[in-house]
Amino acid sequence: MQTAKSIIVRGRVQGVGFRPFIFGLASDYNIVGTVQNNMDGVSIIAEGDINSLDKFINAIQTRLPRLAKIYEYIVRDNELAGFENFSIIESSKSGTSSLVIPIDASICPDCSEELLNKDNKRYNYPFINCTQCGPRYSIISALPYDRPYTSMENFKMCADCREEYDNPLDRRHHAQPNACEICGPKYELYRIDGTLIEGNIVEHVAELIKSGNIVAIKGIGGYHLVCDATNESVVNKLRQRKNRPSKPLAIMAKNIDEINKICSFNIKERDLLQSIESPIVLLNKRSDSNIIAESVAPNLSQLGVMMPYTPFHVLLFNENNIKYLVMTSANPSGLPMLYKDCEAFTYLNNIADYIVSNNREILHAIDDSVVQVIESSASIIRRARGYVPEPITTQSSCDSIIALGSQQKNTFSIGRNSQIFIGPHIGDLNSVEVYNHFLSEFNHLNKWMGVNPMKIAIDLHPSFTTNELAKEFSGEIVKIQHHHAHLVSCMVDNNIRDENVIGIILDGTGYGTDGNIWGFEILEGNEGSFERLAHLRYTNLPGGDKSIIEPWKNAVGMLYSLLGERGKNYSKKLFKDQSDTINIICNMIDKNLNSPLAGTCGRLFDAVASILGVCTKATYDGEAAIILSNLADLNLINQIESYSYDILNEDNLFIIDFSSCLERIIEDKFNNVSNEYIATMFHQTVVNSIIDTIILLDKIDSKIVLSGGSFHNPYLLLGVKSKLNKLGFEVYSHRNIPTNDGGLSLGQLVIASKL
Ligand code: ZN
Ligand code: ZN
Ligand code: FE
C-alpha cells in the first residue's frame, strides 16, 4: 500500500550534496516525491510502500554524506499526491531562516584517490574538491554560498567542470570551488626574493624541505611555515627566525601508521585525526621514539599532530621521504595568521627561504583547530578551521545580541534567532593589528547574519580591549563577570537550562566584582545571576599582569603575602641571585604599590613551577602550568596523599589557603625530593582542597560544571570529576566549546540574553 510522509531535516544539509543524496536513496528504495531546500533546511515529500518508506527514512540518517550533519529530523504523515517520479525542485523561501555557513573540510577519500590516479583528469591537481570536501568558510565573500560570492568567482569553469557542476547526480553538483587544471587556480613557487621557480612544484618543495630549507606554504586558512620535523638544526633555525624559543610546534604526518611510530593514540584520537575537521590533536609522545626532533616540543610529553588535509599536502607527503613536517601558522609574533598574498613576502622575509603561493584568494584567515582527548572525551583547545562557524542552537532567543569575548584567546559570538555563531579564534587583543582583525572578521560574519546588535556583552575588566571595541557599536553595553561567563558557557555546552548549578572555575585571570583578580572560584549560579561561595586566598601579585611572564616574581609575592618574613627568606633561598629584586617586591607589597590582590589557579601553578625551578620565565601563555602538568603522574590520580591546606569560613565565604602546602613543597624541594613527586602531590592537593570545599558547602543535589583554562590539565579534570562522581554529583565539563577563554563569548551572550 502506498503511504506518504513529509520529512523536515535541519542542520548542515545545504551545500553538502544532500539533495542528490536523497535523490539517489529515493531511486534505491523506489520512492517518488520531491526534495527541496528551504530557508531552514531541507524538506522532503516521499511516497512509497510502507516498508520501503521506513527503510528510506532510516537510511537518510544512517547513510548521510560525509559533510552533512542533522540537528533536527521531523517525520509526519502526509496526504497521497500520487507523484510519478522523484525530483529535486526549486528552493523555497519559506520557513524562519536558520543559517548554516559551510565549514572548511579536509580532502575526502574519493578526491584523494582521483588526485593520485594517473588516469584521472585531476591527477596531481592540487585544488581538487567536491561537495564533500574542500574550502568553504575561508573563501566566502557573501551569502548565499554560491560561486559568484566566493574567491572562485574569477575562475570560469570549463565545459567539463560545468557539466559536473550542473548534474544533480554528480558528486561535484554545486561544489562551488569545483575546478581542474584547465580552468582552476594554480600554485607557484618563489624564492623569498620574489624569483619564480619553474618546474614541478611539489617535487621541488620536497627537495627543498629535505635539504633543510624553511618553506612557507599557502593552505586553506593562511600560510604555514613548513620544515623537516626530523631535522633538529632546521627546527632550531625556525625557532630563532620566528623568535619563538620554546612554544611547541605542531607537526603534520604522512598517515596514521607514521603517527603510530611517534605517538600513541586511542580510537577517539584516531577518529579526530581523520575527521573532516582534521584538527591538530595533542598526543602522547612515545618515549622510545626519537624520530621527531626534540626541539619541536621541548620538555613536553605531548606533541600536536595533524594529518594532510589539502590536496597539496597529500601530494607533498606522496613524495619519497616526506613523513613528518613541522607545520606552524606563519604569523608574525602576536599578530593574526598571515593569509594575504601581498603581505607574505614582506612578513616572511628573514623567516622563510621559499614561498609556495596560489591564486585562489583566502578571504578569511582561519587557524588550525587544536583538540585534546582526556580519557575518551574530546575537548577543544582552539576552535577554528573545521568547527567555525558551526552554530550552537539555544532554546531561547538570543537575537541581536553580540558578545566580544576575552582579552586572551579571543573569540566573539553573534546571536541570531535561537542560533549563536562563535567566530574564529582571533588571538590576544594586544595590538592594533589584532584589533582590526577582530573588526574585519566580526563585520564579515555579522554581514552574513544581518544582525543589528542591540546588546553588546563584554567582560567586566576595566582595561580589556573589548571596552574599546564595544564603542564601535551603538547598542546597549552589558558587563559580564568573567567566571560567571565561564559557568554559563559550560552549562550551554551541556544543554543545561534554567536551573542553578555549582561552578568550579579554575583559570588564569578574571576581574572580580570586588575589583580583585579571581581565578580559583566556586560559584553557584544560572544564566541570570551568580553568587560566589569559595575562592583561593588572595595574595599580592607584584607588577600585576606583568608578573605572568615572570612566574618567579609571583612566587615571591605569594610567599611573602602568605608567610611574611619567613616567605621572604624562602624566596631568597629559592631565587639566589635575586635578593635585591626580592627586597623591592616585598617593599612594593608593604606599601601596597602596583601589587593587586589575586587568587587564581594559573598564578598558583606559576608559583609552584618556579619554586621547582622548572619555569621561572614564561615565553608563551600557560607555559609554567603546562610544564608542571607534564610532571604530574596521571597514574596516581586520587591514589596519592596530598599536602596540607586550610579551608576557612570568613563571612560566609570559604577561603582556601595553600600556605602550608607551599611551605611543604619548599621543604621537599630543599630535601631533594623529585619534581615529579612534588608536582603530583601538588596536583592532588588542588583536587582535594576543591572536593573538601564542595563537601563543606553541602549542596548535595546540585549539578556541577567545570570550566576555565586550568581544566585542560588532565590531572585536575579527571581528579575532580571522579571524586565528585563518587560523592554522587552529576559533573559536566566542556565538549564542543573551549574550556579556556575561547569559550567565554558564548557564556557572555547567553547571560546578556537574560538581562
Ligand atoms: Zn572530495
Ligand atoms: Zn575545469
Ligand atoms: Fe578565563
Image: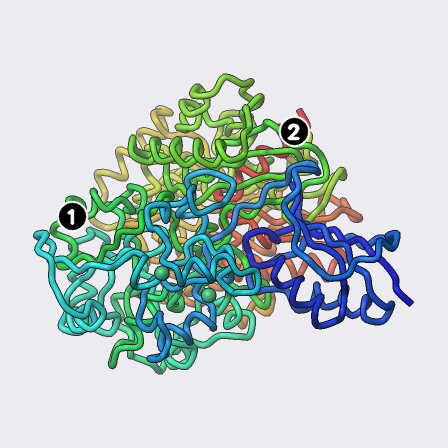
Tag on residue 345?
A: 1
Tell me which corner region of the image, top left, top right, bottom left or bottom right, holds residue 239: bottom left
Residue beneath the point at 47% across and 72% down: 110
| Residue 512: % across, % down | 53, 30
* Label 1 Cα crowd, 10 Å radius (few <14 / some 14-19 / many 20+): many
Instruction: Tell me the quadrant of ligand 2.
Output: bottom left
For label 2, the SS is helix
Residue beneath the point at 17% across and 66% down: 234
Mark pair 1, 2: CA separation: 45 Å
The first of marks 1 and 2 along the sequence is 1
- Give the colour scheme shown: rainbow
Name which residue type carries label 2. Ser
Q: Name the image quarter holding the C terminus.
A: top right
In the rendered image of this protein, does residue 664 appear above or below residue 362? below
Which circle, 1 or 2, is nearer the viewer?
A: 1
* Label 2 Cα crowd, 10 Å radius (few <14 / some 14-19 / many 20+): some
Residue beneath the point at 43% across and 41% down: 149
Name which residue type carries label 1. Phe
Q: Residue furthest front?
A: 84
- Residue 393 appearing in the image: yes
Residue beneath the point at 56% across and 30% down: 481
> Relative to the observer, which residue lies in front, 541 or 18?
18
For label 2, the residue is: 753
> Relative to the observer, which residue lies in front, 734 or 726?
734
